[in-house]
Image (spheres, rainbow, N blue to C red):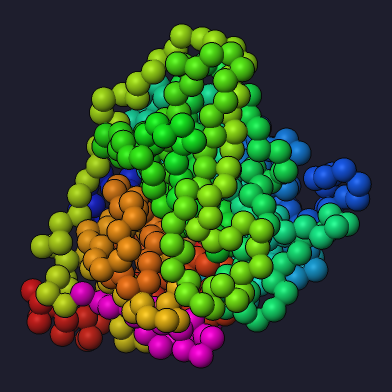
C-alpha cells in the first residue's frame, strides 16, 4: 500500500513496511470523557481523560497508570499495525495526535480532522518509528492547551529488535515519569489560564504532578532503572539534574536510543521533549533518598514573563520533581551498555537547500506569537512551507531575542529530525543528539535542524509546543508533495 519510491533509498531509517499485515495486530478503543479523581483529600477533581480498551490483540499492550489522569500506556513493536477507535465523549471537538510518529496525514491528528463530542475517528497505521518514548494528546485548534491541561495525554512506547537485544531494565524497572505542572483551587478544582498575559507567556502551574497524580515519591530497589521522562507541561521548561550532583546518564531522546550513553550534569527539557535515563540506585543504602530536580536557570521570558507568572513554582526556579527512596538493597547492573543503537547521521551535503536553508523567524507581534509573521490557518500553505517528497532539507528556527522574546519549543509533525547547529543563546545544555521531534529555541538562539521527507504526501504541522502559543496560532501547515514547478526551480538552483 505504501508508495515506496522515495523510501527505497531510506536505508535503515523507516522500515520498508513491505505490505502491512492485512489485519491489525492491535485493535483498541480510546475514549475521551469527563471523569472525577481523588487527587487530594476532600473534593474530587474533575478531569477530562482517555480510557483505553483492547478489542483485539494482546491486552498487555495497553496498561492503565494507577490513580492517574493520564491515558493508558501503549506498548507496541515496530512493524505492528494498530487500529485505534477514538471516541470523543467530551463536550468539545477533539482529535488525537500521535506525537513523534511517522504516520500518514489522515492519522496525524491535524485540527481539520477534529470530531465533535459524541463522534468517533478511526486510526489505522503501521508503526514505523524506532524504539522510543512517544506520546499522544489532543490537537483541536485553539483548544489543545485546555484539553491537555484537563488530563488528556498518554505515553506511546515503541520497542524494536535492536532495543530488545540490549536487555535494558524492563518491567517494573522501566519506569515512565510524565511531568506536568498544575494549579488547583482550594476546592481541588483544576485552574487554567486566568488572564491574557498567562496565555501569551504560557501557563505555569503551582506544583509539579508526576504521572498524572499528586504523589512524587517512588520506592525503588537498589539497582538500575530505565526512566522515561516526558515533559508534558503546557509551557514549563525544566533543567533536569540529580539532587546529589551525580551525572545524568542519557540513553535516548525523542526519537529513541542514542548510539552511546550521554553523560552530563544537567539538561534542559522543553515541553514535549523526552529523555530516557539510566538511573542507578545500586550504591544506595536502604532508606536512602535521591531526587530529580529542576535546577535554576534564566527562563528568558523577560518582563512579560514576570507579569504573567503568578505560579508558586516560578519559571527557572529550583524545585524537586521526583524523589526516589531505596527500599531494598540489591546488587544489580550498574552500567548502561557500552553501545546502544545504530544511529544514522543525516548529511547536510545531501540537503536540497544546503546553501539556502529555510528560515523560520519566531517572534512576538503585539502579544501574538508568530512564525515568519504568520499565524495558523486551517488549510493555508505558504510557498516557503512546501517541500518535496523524498528530499532532505535544512530548516532554521530563529528566535530573535530582545525584550519580548520567549523560549519556543518547536515541534515538527510526521518525522524525526536531527539538530546540526545551535547558535547565539544562553548556553545551557540541550539534548541536541540523536533523533528529535521537538527542540527548544531560547531567546536569541538560532537552531538548525535537518530532516528527510519520506513515504507520505500531504498536510502536516509545525508549531511551538508551548500549548498556549500553539492555541494562539503559533502553528503552521507544511505540505509534502511530488515535484512541482517551484521545486524544480529550487533543485536547479541548489543541485
Ligand atoms: Cu505534541 Cu502538534 O504536537
Ligand atoms: Cu507532534
Ligand atoms: Cu512559543
User: Quadrant location of residue 362?
Assistant: bottom left
Residue 373 among magenta residues? yes
User: Quadrant location of residue 304?
Assistant: bottom right
Residue positioned 66% across, 38% down in the render: 216
Depth order, front residue of 279/175: 279
- Residue 149 x, y percent position in the rendering: 68, 61
Task: Write down the region rendered in magenta.
Answer: 357-378
67 to the left or right of 335:
right
- Residue 375 x, y percent position in the rendering: 48, 85
Depth order, front residue of 183/414: 183
Vertical relation: 336 (above or below) 403: above
Residue 413 among magenta residues? no
Residue positioned 25% across, 77% down in the render: 358
Residue positioned 36% across, 40% down in the render: 265
- Residue 354 x, y percent position in the rendering: 14, 70
Vertical relation: 289 (above or below) 362: above
Specify whether residue 111 is in view: no
Amino acid at each position: 500500500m505504501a508508495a515506496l519510491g522515495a523510501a527505497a533509498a531510506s536505508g535503515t531509517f523507516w522500515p520498508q513496511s513491505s505490505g502491512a499485515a492485512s489485519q491489525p495486530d492491535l485493535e483498541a478503543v480510546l475514549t475521551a470523557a469527563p471523569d472525577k479523581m481523588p487527587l487530594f483529600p476532600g473534593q474530587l477533581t474533575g478531569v477530562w481523560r482517555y480510557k483505553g480498551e483492547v478489542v483485539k490483540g494482546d491486552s498487555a499492550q495497553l496498561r492503565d497508570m494507577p490513580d492517574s489522569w493520564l491515558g493508558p500506556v501503549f506498548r507496541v513493536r515496530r512493524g505492528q499495525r494498530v487500529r485505534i477507535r477514538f471516541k470523543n465523549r467530551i463536550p468539545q471537538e477533539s482529535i488525537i495526535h500521535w506525537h513523534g510518529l511517522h504516520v500518514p496525514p489522515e492519522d496525524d491528528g491535524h485540527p481539520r480532522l477534529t470530531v465533535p463530542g459524541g463522534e468517533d475517528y478511526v486510526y489505522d497505521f503501521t508503526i514505523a518509528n524506532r524504539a522510543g518514548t512517544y506520546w499522544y494528546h489532543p490537537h483541536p485548534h485553539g483548544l489543545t492547551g485546555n484539553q491537555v491541561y484537563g488530563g488528556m495525554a498518554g505515553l506511546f512506547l515503541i520497542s524494536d529488535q535492536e532495543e530488545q537485544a540490549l536487555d535494558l531494565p524492563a518491567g517494573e524497572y522501566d519506569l515512565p515519569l510524565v511531568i506536568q505542572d498544575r494549579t488547583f483551587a482550594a476546592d481541588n478544582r483544576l485552574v487554567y489560564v486566568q488572564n491574557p498575559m498567562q496565555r501569551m507567556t504560557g501557563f505555569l502551574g503551582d506544583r509539579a504532578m508526576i504521572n498524572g497524580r499528586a504523589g512524587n515519591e517512588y520506592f525503588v530497589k537498589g539497582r538500575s532503572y530505565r526512566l522515561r521522562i516526558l515533559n508534558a507541561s503546557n509551557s514549563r521548561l525544566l533543567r533536569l539534574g540529580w539532587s546529589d550532583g551525580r551525572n545524568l546518564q542519557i540513553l535516548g531522546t525523542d526519537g529513541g536510543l542514542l548510539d552511546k550513553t550521554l553523560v552530563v550534569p544537567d539538561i534542559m527539557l522543553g515541553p514535549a521533549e523526552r529523555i530516557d535515563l539510566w538511573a542507578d540506585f545500586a550504591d544506595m543504602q536502604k532508606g536512602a533518598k535521591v531526587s530529580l530536580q529542576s535546577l535554576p536557570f534564566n527562563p528568558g521570558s523577560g518582563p512579560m514573563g514576570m507579569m504573567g507568572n503568578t505560579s508558586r513554582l516560578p519559571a527557572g526556579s529550583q524545585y524537586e520533581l521526583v524523589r526516589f527512596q531505596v527500599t531494598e538493597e540489591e546488587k544489580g547492573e550498574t552500567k548502561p551498555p557500552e553501545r546502544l543503537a545504530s544511529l544514522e547521521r543525516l548529511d547536510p551535503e545531501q540537503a536540497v537547500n544546503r546553501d539556502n536553508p529555510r528560515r523560520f523567524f519566531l517572534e512576538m507581534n503585539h502579544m501574538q506569537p508568530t512564525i515568519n509573521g504568520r499565524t495558523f490557518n486551517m488549510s493555508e500553505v505558504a510557498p516557503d512551507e512546501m517541500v518535496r517528497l523524498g528530499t532532505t532539507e535544512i530548516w532554521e528556527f530563529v528566535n530573535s531575542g530582545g525584550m519580548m522574546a520567549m523560549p519556543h519549543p518547536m515541534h515538527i509533525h510526521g518525522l524525526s529530525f536531527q539538530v546540526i547547529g545551535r547558535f547565539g543563546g544562553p548556553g545551557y545544555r540541550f539534548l541536541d543528539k540523536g533523533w528529535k521531534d521537538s527542540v527548544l529555541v531560547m531567546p536569541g538562539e538560532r537552531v538548525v535542524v535537518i530532516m528527510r521527507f519520506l513515504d507520505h504526501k500531504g498536510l502536516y504541522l509545525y508549531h511551538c509546543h508551548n500549548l498556549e502559543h500553539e492555541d494562539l496560532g503559533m502553528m503552521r501547515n507544511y505540505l509534502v508533495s511530488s515535484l512541482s514547478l517551484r521545486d524544480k526551480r529550487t533543485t536547479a538552483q541548489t543541485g
